[in-house]
Image (tube, rainbow, N blue to C red):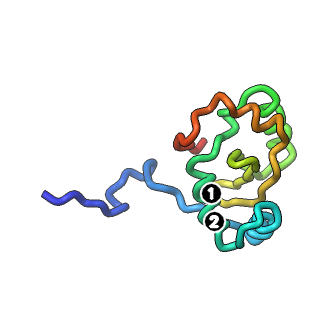
Amino acid sequence: MAINTDVDCIEPELKPQPVAVTAHARLRFRERVGLPKNACQVQAQIVYDYGFTHTDAKGKAKKYLDRRFLKYKKVTQFRVYGGFIYIFCNAKLITMLAAPKGVEEGFKHCKVGKKASSP
């Protein structure tokens, strides 16, 4: 009996959600990370799947992300990955910010390499 590896047979909540990237996010990615704009799509998908979420934060990191969440009213998700805060609206990368040192400290308790859960 052959195993069906078609993506359509996977339950909807388990399917990987493709991430869209805005032109502004591509520009900021190139400016802040230094990699080509074409690498932004791949990195955005990795961040969306494996980045730490707002619910993973503790202490100063949680407080900082709360303030940012109130500032950007259309934001639905933050992901912290590799020293940057990636700002998403649904599954669309809007922009990215450099994470202050205190923010990264708030994620030290998290398991590295876990699959992030979408809120």
Residue in the picture at 70% in, 45% down? 80
The residue identified by callout 1 is 91
Choose between 61 and 77: the one closer to the eye. Answer: 61
Looking at the rendered image, the quarter that the C terminus falls into is top right
Q: CA distance from mark 2 to mark 1?
A: 6 Å
Q: Which residue is farthest front?
A: 34
Choose between 9 and 31: the one closer to the eye. Answer: 31
Secondary structure under tag 2 reads strand
Q: Which residue is farthest top?
A: 59
Please provide percent x and percent y for residue 76.
70, 48
Looking at the rendered image, the quarter that the N terminus falls into is bottom left
Residue 110: image quadrant is top right
Residue in the picture at 30% in, 60% down? 5
Of mark 2 and mark 1, the one earlier in the sequence is 2
Residue 58: image quadrant is top right
Please provide percent x and percent y for residue 54.
70, 38
Q: Amino acid at mark 2?
A: Ala
Label annotation for residue 20: 2
Choose between 20 and 107: the one closer to the eye. Answer: 107
Residue in the picture at 38% in, 51% down? 11
Please provide percent x and percent y for residue 9.
32, 57
Secondary structure under tag 1 reads loop
